[in-house]
Image: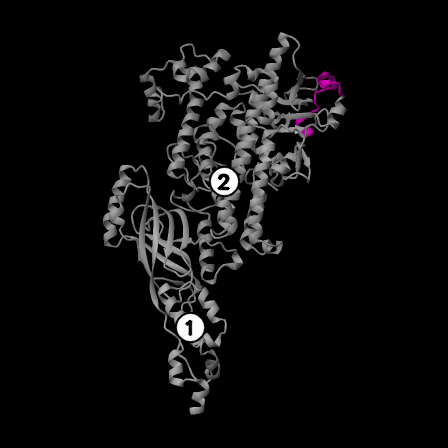
């Protein structure tokens, strides 16, 4: 025994008192791994000191570890602090104020806000995630009257030293009223502060009994999810998907699909009925967010309407925040007034007339609408307008913003060079294409619409090509076209049957001059054929006399009317808003909030569902602003659906692919963005490609960080489910 003591340099009793845990010696990597765990600072210091003492005896311990049995160390408890940031409303109605004070009072008696930390590790006893004790927010009642935009509350947790890293936190709101939770920061772990970006409304437990789950800002791919968070990650996604039944409450957070069956209101009469878009009715269209409202009385397949000022359902976190709502409301008010007042001019005026001439249009910018109408205060108060209108008379809200081009030249809009410039630098610069064959060819089915041969002939444009033949101009990429023939022609008979609306389907040919600018050289106006010998098409060319000048101006006006309709119904509403909605729904249903791709997309998806819902309620609905202001009238959304069926392709929606499809650019690997523009002075494309290249480079590096090879993309079950759901649902809803 003495020899053993001499060899070991310490007695067995003395040795055992120095050993804090047998696992230090049973696992040589323990010290390195344990230092990486997120444990309390108080325990960390004692453990490091004890470990250094043990390491000095590591040689002796190796000899003796089979001779002794070491008792594992008991876990140490310590406190960590949560700082919870809640965002207050700037404006509260009386009911909200009363409930807020009631919540402050009842908070003292246990009806409070409770938090619970969840570890990334599994509890070996429960086989579930490790959880902390429940902690409540302090000082809610004392801080309830603070008028600041953000209020910070604190809470304290008691956790074990083997708790691990907090990866999620649950919040239970026992108050009567929801509140906006901006963020939570946990302080006191050795790994540093752990941040939870929330940016979400937390509903009262009486409305939503389950606990709200928030994940830390550490992203995880599905197969990399820590064991303690796997079941929670899946449960959160199931809650967001819902079960596809029931009427949605405004406080819900359920993302589900439906078709556009709520644009009309057949209960008001046949004139307010509108076709269903999407589904199995052979009218393909992107899907919208499901609200689950009851059907109308007269049509079981149509969903009942919710009229203003009642709100439409979108998931609670998709609704506008207060600052966003204020900005949106101001803009919408201005737009509504601009659309309403010209109509009032006709209805209130003693002569009940429309615009007499261009001078009336000028007055929209110069004199202001109220001054022009001569409305009295009494009449203004009787109009169904928001209260803010009563104070507008002294301001300029009812004036149209004067376009810069008009501030320098009042008649610029009449000139051909400005008409051509608008095609590449106006509000709708995405329809111009390089002309590949002359005359242009229609893609409409001749069995349905008849032979649609163009009336354009070489003699119409030959004198405007700077001495070139038509073929030479085609080969030199000098001829371009804005073609609205196929979009409008199928609807013209119905449009022209509407009171006060007349339209042609237009084609406009442009020539690219030596200066690099466009000039219009011919406009084709088309109507549906009414018989074998009917004259359904005519060509108008730049004028040579006064009569021809006004014919040319009217032809350009029809082109602008077509352009305005396609811009709003197809390029703006369809391609920018409607087509994104099913992507947004799929992302929320299939990608966890901790998924890195979700974190990339989330800021860009927010508010789109709310904007789209407001559009369904007021803009694209039966007798809404779009139908009232655009030439297609009640057929606006059917035109949008036809464009989706015939022209929309996901793989061609990106800017470079779109430019190549339209023949406006060719591949060029020497360029940063890989393209060469055929019209150098094309501001939309030139500026857009620089922005595209910058965004693409940043996104590519971000995605490559998480997916170094394609195999990881294939193995990402959430990403694959998101993609599959979008493709499958589009086939189901009419788009193959």
As for residue 497 lying within the magenta part, the answer is no
Q: Give the label on residue 70, or none.
A: none
Task: Give the left or right position of residue 471, taking residue 231 as reference.
Answer: right
Please, what secondary structure does the residue beneath circle 1 have?
Answer: helix
- Of tags 2 and 1, the one toward the viewer is 1
What secondary structure is marked by label 2? strand
Indicate the quadrant where residue 53 lies. Answer: bottom left
| Residue 713 locus on image (x, y percent) | 59, 53
Q: Which residues are magenta?
A: 445-468
Residue 440 placement: quadrant = top right
| Whether residue 381 is situated above or below residue 142 in the rendered picture | above
What residue is rendered at 45% in x and 12% in y? 353
Q: Is residue 563 left or right of residue 606?
A: right
Looking at marks 2 and 1 on the same chain, the residue that comes earlier in the sequence is marked by: 1
When asked about the image quadrant of residue 492, the answer is top right
Residue 454 is inside the magenta segment: yes
Q: Position of residue 623 (x, y in %)?
A: 46, 26
Which residue is labeled 1 in the image?
Answer: 51
- Residue under label 2, please give it: 288
Quarter of the picture containing the C terminus is top right
């Amino acid at each position: 025994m003495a020899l053993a003591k001499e060899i070991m340099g310490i007695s067995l009793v003395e040795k055992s008192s120095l050993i804090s845990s047998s696992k230090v010696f049973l696992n040589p990597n323990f010290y390195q791994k344990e230092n990486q765990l997120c444990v309390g600072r108080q325990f960390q210091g004692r453990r490091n000191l004890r470990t250094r003492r043990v390491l000095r005896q590591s040689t002796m311990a190796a000899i003796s570890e089979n001779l002794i049995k070491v008792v594992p160390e008991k876990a140490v408890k310590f406190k960590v602090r949560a700082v919870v940031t809640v965002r207050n409303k700037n404006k509260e109605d009386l009911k909200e104020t009363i409930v807020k004070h009631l919540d402050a009072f009842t908070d003292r008696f246990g009806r409070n806000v409770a938090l619970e930390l969840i570890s990334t590790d599994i509890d070996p006893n429960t086989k579930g995630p490790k959880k902390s004790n429940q902690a409540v927010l302090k000082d809610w009642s004392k801080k309830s009257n603070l008028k600041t935009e953000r209020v910070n509350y604190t809470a304290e947790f008691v956790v074990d030293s083997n708790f691990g890293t907090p990866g999620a936190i649950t919040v239970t709101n026992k108050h009567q009223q929801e509140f906006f939770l901006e963020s939570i920061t946990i302080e006191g772990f050795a790994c540093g502060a752990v941040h939870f970006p929330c940016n979400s409304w937390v509903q009262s437990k009486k409305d939503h009994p389950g606990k709200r789950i928030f994940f830390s800002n550490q992203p995880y791919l599905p197969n990399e999810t820590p064991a303690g968070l796997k079941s929670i990650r899946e449960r959160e996604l199931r809650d967001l998907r819902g079960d596809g039944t029931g009427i949605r409450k405004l406080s819900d957070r359920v993302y589900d699909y439906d078709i556009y069956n709520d644009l009309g209101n057949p209960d008001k009469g046949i004139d307010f009925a509108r076709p269903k878009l999407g589904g199995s009715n052979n009218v393909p269209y992107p899907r919208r967010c499901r609200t689950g409202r009851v059907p109308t009385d007269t049509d079981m397949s149509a969903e009942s309407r919710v009229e203003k000022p009642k709100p439409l359902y979108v998931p609670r976190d998709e609704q506008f925040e207060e600052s966003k709502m204020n900005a949106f409301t101001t803009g919408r008010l201005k737009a509504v007034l601009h659309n309403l007042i010209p109509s009032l001019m006709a209805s209130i005026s003693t002569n009940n007339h429309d615009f007499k001439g261009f001078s009336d249009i000028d007055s929209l910018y110069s004199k202001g609408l109220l001054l022009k109408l001569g409305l009295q205060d009494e009449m203004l108060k009787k109009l169904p307008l928001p209260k803010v209108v009563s104070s507008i008379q002294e301001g300029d809200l009812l004036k149209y913003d004067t376009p810069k081009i008009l501030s320098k030249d009042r008649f610029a809009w009449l000139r051909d060079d400005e008409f051509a410039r608008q095609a590449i630098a106006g509000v709708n610069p995405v329809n111009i294409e390089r002309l590949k064959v002359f005359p242009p060819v229609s893609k409409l089915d001749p069995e349905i619409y008849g032979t649609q041969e163009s009336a354009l002939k070489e003699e119409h444009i030959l004198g405007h090509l700077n001495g070139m033949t038509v073929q030479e101009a085609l080969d030199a990429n000098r001829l371009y076209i804005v073609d609205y023939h196929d979009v409008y022609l199928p609807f013209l008979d119905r449009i022209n049957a509407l009171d006060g609306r007349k339209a042609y389907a237009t084609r406009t040919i442009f020539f690219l001059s030596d200066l690099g600018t466009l000039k219009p050289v011919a406009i084709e106006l088309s109507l549906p054929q009414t018989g074998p010998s009917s004259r359904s098409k005519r060509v108008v060319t730049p004028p040579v006399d006064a009569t021809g000048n006004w014919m040319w101006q009217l032809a350009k006006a029809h082109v602008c009317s077509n352009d305005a309709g396609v811009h709003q119904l197809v390029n703006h509403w369809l391609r920018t808003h409607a087509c994104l909605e099913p992507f947004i729904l799929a992302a929320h249903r299939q990608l966890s909030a901790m998924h890195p791709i979700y974190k990339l997309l989330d800021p860009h998806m927010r508010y789109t569902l709310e904007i789209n819902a407001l559009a369904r309620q007021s803009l694209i609905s039966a007798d809404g602003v779009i139908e009232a202001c655009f030439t297609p009238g009640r057929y606006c959304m059917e035109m949008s659906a036809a464009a989706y069926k015939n022209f929309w392709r996901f793989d061609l929606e990106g800017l470079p692919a779109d430019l190549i499809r339209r023949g406006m650019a060719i591949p060029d690997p020497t360029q940063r963005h890989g393209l060469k523009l055929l019209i150098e002075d094309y501001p939309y494309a030139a500026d857009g490609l620089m922005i595209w290249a910058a965004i693409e480079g940043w996104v590519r590096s971000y995605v490559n960080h998480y997916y170094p090879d394609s195999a990881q993309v294939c193995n990402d079950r959430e990403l694959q489910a998101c993609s599959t759901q979008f493709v499958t649902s589009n086939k189901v809803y009419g788009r193959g």
